[in-house]
Image: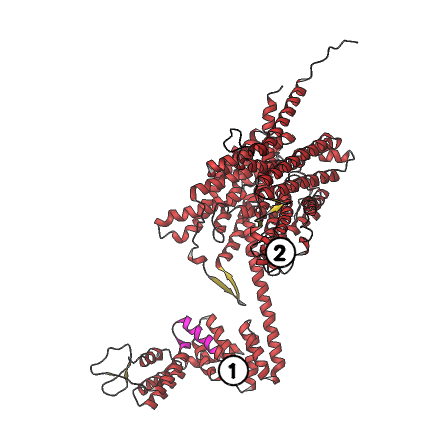
Amino acid sequence: MARLLSVLLVLIASAWPAAAQDAFDAAVTGLAGGFSQQAEAVERLGALGDPRAVPVLRALSEGRLLKRPDGNGVVPPAEAAPPGAEPVRVNNRVRVALRGALGRLQLVSPDPAERLAAAEAVFRSRDAANAPLLEAALARESVPRIRAQMELSLAASRLVAADADAKRAAIAALGATASTDARGLLLEARAANPGLLAEIEAAVAAIDRRLSLRRMAETLFQGLSLGSVLLLAALGLAVTFGVMGVINMAHGEMVMIGAYTAVLVQEALRGVPALLPWSLPLSVPAAFLVAALVGAAIERGLIRHLYGRPLETLLMTFGVGMILQQAVRSLFGAQNREVVSPPWMQGTLTLPGGVEVTQNRLWIIVFGLAVLLAVLAAIRLTRFGLEMRAVVQNRRIAATMGIRTGRVDALTFAFGSGVAGMAGVALSQIDNVSPNLGTGYIIDSFMVVVFGGVGSLAGTLVGAMTLGVVNKVLEPWAGAVLAKVAVLVALMLFIQRRPRGLFALRGRAAEG
Amino acid sequence: MSVALASPAPPRAAVARNAFRWALIGAVLLLALLPILNRLPADSALHVSDFLVSVTGKWITYAVLALAIDLAWGYAGILSLGHGAFFALGGYAIGMHLMRLIGPRGVYGHPVLPDFMVFLGYRELPWYWLGFDHFPFALLMALAVPGLLAAVVGFLAFRSRITGVYFSIITQAMTYALMLAFFRNDMGFGGNNGFTDFKELLGTPLNTPNARAMLFYASLAALLGAYWICARVVGSKLGRVLVAVRDAESRVRFLGYDTTRIKLFVFVLSAVLAGLAGALYVPQVGIINPGEFSPGNSIEAVVWVAVGGRGTLVGALLGAFSVNALKTWLTSVAPDLWLFALGGLFVLVTLFLPRGLVGLLRRREP
């Protein structure tokens, strides 16, 4: 119905300019006449809804509009003033008319923000007389967000009209939205329209349904976004802990190193303004390399001496993490650093149905999935991945087949650390880059890996997303901190039932 | 085969053990002298400062915590990264008692409610604060609450045969969750600020030489008691089974021992000792806040044991005193270096000194 109406309006509008030309010119000429003629002309200009009227009326209200010396109409504000031209004088009646006309004309202003504000003002005024204006404005409007507001305002002004059919149509149009404003409007209209109560109730119920759906969608999105942060933080761990079985408590520091690499890349690119918007994508490979190098050094220098002694590895890597943290603190200072988001990551995006998502969160979800796929591909499809799986399954046989197991260990650890470094680049967008950036994620990451099932990347994905969504679903009831505590407790209980996680390895691989 | 044995010389190991014992007794006596020397006039050559007494008193409580960790980790192979939580819970229990003793002397002057509750708009004392005005009850809670928590966590974990690093990570998550919970104001434990501004304990105003000496001797007594209990456990048949569980748990289970119960007993005992340590610690430092639950604290305590030498009770004591002495010295001389040093200790001990300082001392012997 609404669509049909707007199509109709568009058709009318396209046939309109020729006729409007004359009406506009005639009205403008009228501004040079007597006061009552002026007022009439102003009102006509306001009702025409032609954006060209705005500068003319503004000039008139500010006393800048000039009369042609020959008495033949006014000088358009853009034109140079001819000699002897005098300003048009107005009285109070014309001034009142001017204010009303300018307000309505804002609906067709060239500035979208002004149009939106005008549409909102009309919505609040709830005046049936505004309906034709809105129809005219809608016919020219192309910005979806403003169109939606105008349609809402149109329905609102029709709701106070006398015509019952128009009211019914308006209620239906309002009921088709998912706006709290429309809901308020309908609730308000209940008292005035006892005959339409059933329709109004149905429309309110429809809005409520849509609103709760939207809220669910938004919670889901927030949960997925938190989940992808957890996924990013845990993926590296899924390689070093899940695949290699090395407890790396310095994992959080690898993430932190990745974030600081992003800071450094940004600093380095300050001299090259053309590349600056791309500093974040460029940081990703840089962070991978830096974290991977640090990881390889730690594996070769320290961890390899402790294979088969997990508790010692845990303590040792914790110490390494402390040293790395303190080293970064002395190099960069303890204060937070900022990594600027590139323009294409800023702002929010409105999905159909009015669900609002922030761009950088959206990118992190995309990035998390991309990294997951890259890790999967590296393990499943490359020679390195094959050797890695071989060493994990049977180190000695792998060695007899000519695989240099020590080198594979170092590469695997470096790979896991590099993935953590890439996670750091993503985290730099939503968290403070500080030396203890990683400590907040280490326990969560271990929880994700253990929950999902050690050694299973699919488990890591499902684990991260589940924890993220559950956290966000609980948050409104329990508050952020208690939600986290509840998730931790639930997880501890879950591990009771499934000590090997959601996606437990079965068969021989499980015994390793 | 009747060879006349001349009275045989005692074996060298026994000599060493005797020397060790005497050194230990000497150290305890030396410690016991500190509060007395503190009372000497300030210009006396033997006078020790208030600072030294209070800092040593603090280390003694750390040593009790180290013993607790060593009993679980060094003997039974249960590496808990959440012992700081038991320590903090013991501290909070005594802290609640100390808060109740402030009475109307708080800033707001409320006769019953502690300042933070008045500030947060509490009308009456939450039910779980009842009884804490009695010292014996508070002390009982300082031991019982950590013990109960350990019993629940340990039962769930050991029953499902969660061992090794998995258990470590679960206990770390436990202390992390508790930290988050205690940071909340509506828990009724003072939130971020915790408890402080204590006035007195057992009728003795805190922060006086008398109170310091009293707490010092109480801590020393607790340390000796804890050592005695641990030595009894370790030296008994149970102690041998514990070591066997550490080295080959499945085998011990197949031999018919109920390893779940054995581990649970040790873990709970260890948590109770940690709670005792916390209860003695808080009146001495005069503050308890959720920071005590931070996972870093627990793991730092584990490193004391690792540095001293796990699997020996003396090692736990040696580690607690030496690492904390190093910390106190280094944080006053070069604060930035402390974390490097602590991290370095982790690496050094795990890579080069798996048996800690005690191992280093014993290597000299054949």
Q: Distance of mark 1 from mark 2, alpha carbons?
A: 60 Å
Q: Which chain carries label 1?
A: A
Q: Is residue A398 visible?
A: no
Q: Up-down: is B337 above or below A100? A: above
Instruction: For marks 1 and 2, give the one nearer the viewer.
Output: 2
Residue A292 % position (x, y): 49, 41
Q: Residue at x 58, y 60 (%)?
A: A220
Where on the picture, by quarter, is residue A177?
bottom right
For the residue pair A406 and B266, the one nearer the viewer reads as B266
Q: Which chain carries label 2?
A: B
Highlighted range, magenta? A106-122
Where on the picture, by quarter, is residue A330?
top left
SS under mark 2: loop
| Residue tagged 1 | A158
Residue A114 highlighted magenta (yes or no): yes
Q: Up-down: is A175 above or below A313? A: below
Q: What residue type is disc 2 on?
A: Leu
Where on the picture, by quarter, is residue B240?
top right
Same chain? Circles 1 and 2: no
Q: What residue type is disc 1 on?
A: Arg
Count of labels shown?
2
Residue A54 % position (x, y): 35, 78
For the residue pair A430 and B364, the one nearer the viewer reads as B364
| Disc 2: CA contacts within 10 A as few (<14), some (14-19) or many (>=20) | many
| Residue tagged 2 | B113
- A499 sits left or right of B34 in the view: right
- A99 sits left or right of B106 in the view: left
Q: Is residue B336 visible?
A: yes
Q: Up-down: is A174 above or below B254? A: below
